[in-house]
Amino acid sequence: MIRLLCLALFCLALANNAYTAEHIQIHASPGDNVTLPCRLNRETSLSFGVMGNRIKWTKLEGAFNEVDVLVSMGFHKIKYGRFQNHAHLLEADENDASLIINNIELDDFGTYKCEVMNGMDENVVEVDIRMQGVASLSFTGVVFPYSPRVGRYNLNFHDAEKACLDQDAVVATFEQLYQAWKGGLDWCNAGWLSDGTVQYPINKPREPCGGRRNGAGLRSYGRRDKSNSRFDVFCYTSGFTGQVFFVDQKLTYNEAVQACQNDGGELAKTGHMFAAWKLHGYDRCDAGWLSDGSVRYPISRPRMKCSPTEAAVRFIGFPDKKHKLYGAYCYKAQ
């Protein structure tokens, strides 16, 4: 279990309800159990421990939306949605309001807020004592652009969500794309992000990718109609516990599927390929089929005839599945 403990800040919620919050960064991988810390500071607390307070955990989804995770009032606890069998309070001592999330999944990454309130009705007293803690749960992963076989700019937001899930990934957040851009990601096609905005990262300003005069950064189209607007998508996937390997034969797509099954695996997904390349340094200069019908290969060490100028997952395209020209990238789960 990954566990980080620290004291969150106490704040006075005055008439303007202003507060400050301590921000804690937690890194984890799918399948881990994690503890999001939230504690009362007894030296400044006027309460009798967490049992005498109302504890509320929420997950922040975008700038204006909070999803309820858990509410505790003494011995009474309410869990919401998919967190009902997925999360609980640690309660290691009378001042501990930490949240445990078991067997975390890709959908669990993001920012969580802990609120401990002394007094249920703000109107009863002039000043409420509140404790605010904010913890971000992030995975070590990789952001990659994705477009389907039918070509670029063919996904509405809902199609984009499914496209990422089909590749063992989720739609990337703005923060994930921002971190990927800081890490060197440069891509000229605009794609959906999880907040409903459409953006793309540019490290080398050029025409027609926003123009040469605009500096490097994230280019934004703003929020778009999730049903009617169509773009590509930026997906996010984390590390995996299995193995990506190559079958060095000239195969059709169906033969590639069978070859992976013969070795106890399955044809790798695009998310598997990017995770193997970015997180495990996978490097092979052989084009191979992936499960979506695309042909790609991973280069971690740039060199002539493979990828002369940059480390990248090289994309050949979506060739006719009957072509007997490519090997197969397989994935075997552990």
Image: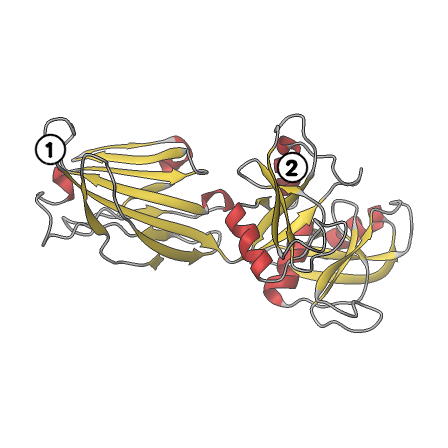
Q: Is residue 165 above or below residue 265?
A: above
Q: Identify the image quadrant of residue 202.
A: bottom right
Does 154 sit left or right of 109 as displayed?
right
Q: Is residue 189 above or below residue 84?
A: below
Q: Is residue 102 above or below residue 184?
A: above
Tell me the quarter of the image containing the C terminus.
bottom right
Image location of residue 324, percent across then percent down: 91, 53
Circle 2 residue: 160
Q: Is residue 310 above or below residue 189?
A: below
- Tell me the SS state at disc 1: loop
Q: How many C-alpha atoms fall within 10 Å of the one at disc 2: few (<14), some, or many (≥20)?
A: many
Q: Residue at x 72, y 55 (%)?
A: 212
Query: Is label 2 or label 1 in front?
Result: 1
Is residue 274 or residue 40 the one in the foreground? Answer: 40
Image location of residue 2, percent across then percent down: 36, 58
Image location of residue 129, percent across then percent down: 15, 41
Is residue 168 in view? no
Q: Identify the image quadrant of residue 229.
A: top right
Q: Amino acid at mark 2?
A: Ala
Tell me the quarter of the image containing the N terminus.
bottom left
Circle 1 residue: 126
Q: Earlier in the sequence, mark 2 or mark 1?
A: 1
How far is mark 2 from mark 1, CA to CA?
48 Å
In the rendering, which numbered label is found on residue 31?
A: none
Q: Identify the image quadrant of residue 25.
A: bottom left
- Tell me the SS state at disc 2: helix
Is residue 294 in view? yes
Q: How is the image coloured?
A: secondary structure
